[in-house]
Image (cartoon, grey):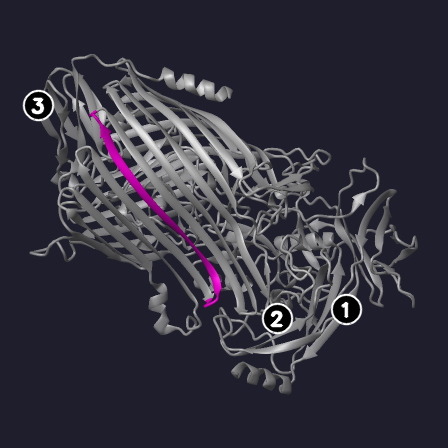
Amino acid sequence: MKKLIVFFLACLNFACDTEINPTLNPAAEVMVVDAWLNDKNETQKIFLTISQPYFDQSSPEMVEGASVSVKDLSSGETITFVETDAYYGWEPGDEAFLVVGHQYQLLLEVDGKAYTANAGLGEVPEVDSVQFTYNPKDINFKEPYFTAEFMANDIPGRGDAYWIKAWKNGVYLSKPSEINIAYDAGFSSTQTMDGVLFNQIIRKDFVNPWDENPEKENSFLPPYVVGDSLYLEIHSIDPMAFEFLSGVILQTNRPGGFSELFATPLSNVISNIYPVSEESSTKVQGFFNVSAVTSGGGKLTAAIAETAMNAADD
Amino acid sequence: MKSFVLGGLFFLSLLPGFAQSNSFTISGYLTDETNGEVLIGSTVRVEQINSGTVSNVYGFYSITLEEGVYDLHFSFVGYREIQKKVKLDKDLRLDISLMLSDTELETVVIQSDRMDENVSSVEMSTAKMDIKTIEKMPAFVGEVDVLKSIQLLPGVSSVGEGTSGFNVRGGTVGQNLVLLDEAPVYQSSHLFGFFSVFNPDAVKDVKLYKGGIPTRFGGRLSSVLDIRMKEGNNQDYDVAGGIGTVFSRLSLEGPIKKGKSSFILAGRRSYADVLARPFTDALDNGAGMYFYDLTAKTNFELNEKNKLFVSGYLGRDVFNFDESQGFNWGNKTATIRWNHLYGSKLFSNFSAFYSDYNYGFSFGTNESDKFDWQAAISTWNFKPEFTWFANPSHELTFGGELIAYRFRPADATIINNGELSNISLDHRKAVEGALYVSSEQKFGDKVVAQYGLRFSYFNHFGEKTYTYGDTLPGIERPLIGVTENGSWNSVAQYNNLEPRISVKYSLNESSSLKASYNRMSQYLHQISNTTASLPIDIWQPSDNNILPQTGNQGALGFFKNFFGNRFETSAEVYYKWNQNQMDYIDGAELFINEFMASQLLSGKGRAYGLELYAKKNQGRFTGWISYTLGKTELKVDGINYGDNESTREGNWYPTRYDQRHNLKLAGFYELNKRVTLSANFSYLSGTPTTFPTDRIIVQDKVIPYIDGSDRNNYRIPNFHRLDIALTIDNVWRGKKQRKGTDNLVVSVYNLYGRKNPFSIYFSQGTSTRPQMGEPLATSAHQMSLIGTLIPSVTYNFKF
């Protein structure tokens, strides 16, 4: 799909984009909860911030003095997050807190108001391998190029959701267009592909960065050259988090140009954070999720490159 | 049941009284002498009674008078009037051929009706566009276009240049019924909307009904665009064509049996891909972007009482990234019509037609990893219609329509590492029926009324019935159950009574007041959540969850002509109120979703406006000015609810295509006999869009946030554009001994190169890769689909 849109962009050169500076309605300055925990042995961080005017490019202000805890609803155990100058943190010990299949509840208390959110920890598959392919030149890449692809199978049983994060040479692929999410082995809860190898678009399209070639218009730098590496993590996510990220893609992945014909109206993404008492009118946004994580990677060595080129010749 | 009885009573009340015994009928067809094309809407005036009739869409007229001697005047704009003195003592058949008048040949004919048609006819809220006018207008890349031309008329707009479809009086694109020789065309665009699918070489007449819609039409809320194809020259062979920047056109027409039957065959194909191939290797891997259409029609005059027409259309757009990936869509239509005369007063037409719109896309670079989606909507229709010309002051039309639909929302497969998953959705079937009657009656000299009733019925058959529970509006509704049915089980059925009435009151010879009311219902819904309507939008039939859309419109108009009809003016106001208008929950997943109905929202709509129109019909300078002041809004629970957080009751919000001011100017100036300069100018208020208030950061993504979930709270800047064209006739042909005519059209679209905005969007600064730890940039961008002036040259010929 992405390729098609880029293709249209190239075909319809009538279109043009201009950056503008419109005046917006005043910001609502709502509390934003960014609570994405995982089972990696590293500091778990929960960010509580205040939303900013849309064009404010400074770092957001932190909500201080909150009490933050997460409860395992299955075991009854609770962990408490400690306030630092940038986030609320918790250091995992030797024993894992997050257990696959358990439900977790986030509890927040800010200025006497309580908020809560729920998420479940899903199972995550292992990354089997990372492979590289040699491709002939085409409309977008003016020279032959290498692409990467990972192999992994969806966990059998419907309703698993994943977020696949990728790093090329240690740089996180963090553009909105690089958000790679899967519902079972496919793209949505309504199109069933269960328990099989992830769809090729998930395996391939998002782990190959499309960076514009600064020296040649309408062309892109090759995604991988000899010496480059790919590292990736599969995070299991709550099915609601899949819906949230789908919304984030819709609202943030705006390449402009001809693809604007396909754009949907700007709207708010969903949030799973709710005030505990009904009458609380404080607006709150953000998301709470728990993830189990697996990882894998590979490096395009000269030997692998040669094998790939030979395979392409056959 | 009650509606049946009511309908029956109404039908009976329309029957006119029987004419006196000593009256006789004059009837026949009006045609163009040079090519045998029938003349739609030409006038027959009887001097003695200072009244008359107008030929119908098949060129047929009938008028019943008492025994006596009469002077008849047959006329049509741009043609020489013919006068006949007749002694009427028996029924008379009088087929008349009119000749083009030389003086009119060079002028632009704006409206192909008798000169005071706009004042004298009972019709209001209609707009006609003669193909000769369309051909003279400046056009995008020089390709004259039926759909772009009608957007220069009051009450018609679009969400942006180069987008698919058009909006009429605040309606959606999917609320227009577009008919090509009576067959519905579901997608009227080539290249996502830059061109329309109608080949101007094969089009004879274009008429848009914006209000006061006759009972013979139904099934859409907003408008009917009735496009009639040429029959083909039944006197002589003609070859016509054109070489343009994007398309090449060729058409052939001629007699099969001179004077009795004829054919026309017209084709177009874009050829950018053909021209580019030698210069680029980018197309070597099967990539390509092209579109074509083919239009054919033939007709046979079997005898005086019977005529048969067969017509068809085939068009396709193909956008391939390589040989196995890309988009495609196309329409196919076929129509058979039979005109039969019962005596001289009862005219009948039986139409049977088939229309198919299929579309899809595929991606995946190899056989073991592929995605393929195809969708289609097919329609079979039978439509008998009778017109009884009772007497000069009363005409009765009645008929019916039976439509069978088949919907294929998704025939889709995913091949994943060689394993095939079928993710297709069930096909659906539906039947739509209608019975209608309409009476046009003169009451004295001043009042003419056209009134009638349409009864429509819809039955949706499906293998499954889905039931959803209630939730807070704007949130996906939970699935309660799925009932498996037999394949011909009715999922839901609906019926509606649709009264229609138009009244004209003549103030004097040159001015009249008109009023109309119509009620419409729509059982098919175009599902579109994107800024512009797209060729890959699916059509969803009404079911137990999606109720039929219904709409009402009232309009009032004042029509006045000046200086012997040289200037025509009109002013109309309209108010529309609609029910069951569709919108979507935030983040709705509409593509291949079995449970799509859970994501649809339903609400009320209203639209109102003022339309002003003035045009000059004659002289070296002709043209018109059109202005619309309009407003169109929706109120849907779950959208734009502001502070109503607990109930989510929606507040009114402007639709995406709401435009406050819409000004259009079109002018044609005849520099000399051979050269015409034409220009058109458009000024449109910016369409609404949604701007965020805040940015929120979650997982290193900057997400826009809109306080109060406002919808369409801002407007993009106003749109204006000037296009010009120079038409030079007889450049090569038509000179000396060469047969035929030709012309060269040099045009410039968007003369002053304005970057008219299509949309404004907000994004993270994505041109460079964001660095971890640094604050993320946010920006707003204005996107213009066409950001430059576009010159073009087209050469047209006919011999």
Which percent across, then down, holds residue B322?
Answer: 46, 68
Q: Residue at x 19, y 39 (%)?
A: B302
Can you name the residue that lies furthest to the front here?
Answer: B486
Can you name the residue that lies furthest to the left here?
Answer: B737
**Label 1: which secondary element:** strand
Q: Residue at x 59, y 45 (%)?
A: B690
Amino acid type shown at disc 2: Asn
In which chain is the residue bearing label 3? B
Give the crowd class for mark 3: few <14, some 14-19, many >=20 residues within 10 Å: few
Residue closest to the eye, B388 or B781: B388
**Label 3: which secondary element:** strand
**Label 2: which secondary element:** loop
Residue closest to the eye, B786 or B519: B519
Residue closest to the eye, A104 or B134: A104
Q: Is residue B21 above or below residue B492?
A: above
Q: Earlier in the sequence, mark 1 or mark 2?
A: 2
Horizontal arrangement in the rendering, residue B237 relative to residue A220 (left or right): left
Residue closest to the eye, B254 or B149: B254
